[in-house]
């Protein structure tokens, strides 16, 4: 189910959203990041992912999100669960300045046999494949993306509200 803009902003104002972040690696261990076009986190490099919709089964969310974010459907069974994270932003995807966004993020990782030849441009204006050390040291890679790769992941489960 897709919400109207008014229903979406009410939901963002009143509840946390549940999302899946997809840590996609190539066979050499490089990590896919996209330059976000939308809030929250516009202008930052971020791993692909998105919200789970009301009444959408997790297996269906994987198929939809992988198709939308990397251009091909991958089943949930292709991924390894990394953990649960919280992402809190001062803004939101609707551009409504009156409320922040709170995500509960289920992080999953997959290794692709080959990189996709083309990636969908809907959410990201550019894409890069970064080595883990490059990702961790790039100021334009969002803190929440870096948290998936920091050695002490447990301290990164809770974050302050970030832009």
Image (spheres, helix red, strand yellow):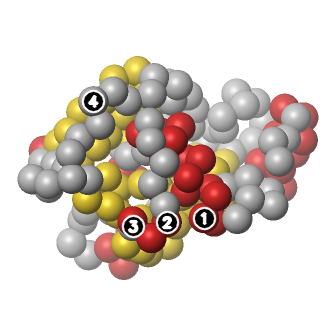
Q: Mark 4 = which residue? A: 117
* Residue at the disc numbered 2: 76
Q: CA distance from mark 2 to mark 1?
A: 6 Å
Q: Secondary structure at mark 1?
A: helix
Q: Is residue 41 left or right of residue 156?
A: right
Sequence-wise first label, 4 or 2? 2
Question: Is label 4 in contact with label 2 (beta carbons under 8 Å)?
Answer: no
Q: Is residue 110 above or below residue 43?
A: below
Q: Residue 17 appears at what percent x and percent y?
A: 69, 57
Q: Earlier in the sequence, mark 4 or mark 3?
A: 3
The residue carrying pointer 4 sits among few (fewer than 14), some (14 to 19) or many (20 or more) residues within 10 Å by Cα, namely: few
Q: Is residue 95 above or below residue 21?
A: above
Alpha-carbon distance for marks 3 and 1? 11 Å
Residue visible at 62% across and 56% down in the picture: 61
> How far apart in space, not on screen, are marks 4 and 3 (Cα)?
20 Å
The answer to which of 21 and 15 lies nearer the viewer is 21
Q: Looking at the image, is mark 2 or mark 1 earlier in the sequence?
A: 1
| Pointer 3 residue | 79
| Up/down of 120 relative to 82, above or below | above
């Amino acid at each position: 189910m897709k919400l109207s803009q008014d229903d979406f902003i009410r939901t963002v104002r009143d509840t946390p959203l549940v999302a899946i972040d997809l840590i996609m690696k190539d066979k050499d261990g490089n990590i896919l990041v996209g330059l976000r076009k939308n809030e929250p986190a516009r202008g930052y490099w971020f791993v692909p992912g998105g919200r789970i919709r009301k009444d959408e089964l997790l297996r269906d969310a994987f198929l939809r999100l992988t198709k939308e974010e990397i251009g091909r459907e991958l089943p949930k069974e292709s991924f390894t669960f990394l953990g649960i994270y919280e992402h809190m932003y001062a803004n939101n995807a609707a551009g409504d300045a009156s409320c922040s966004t709170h995500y509960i993020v289920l992080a999953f990782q997959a290794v692709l046999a080959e990189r996709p030849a083309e990636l969908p441009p809907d959410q990201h204006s550019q894409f890069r494949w970064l080595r883990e050390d490059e990702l961790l040291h790039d100021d334009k890679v969002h803190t929440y993306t870096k948290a998936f790769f920091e050695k002490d992941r447990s301290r990164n489960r809770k974050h302050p509200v970030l832009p």
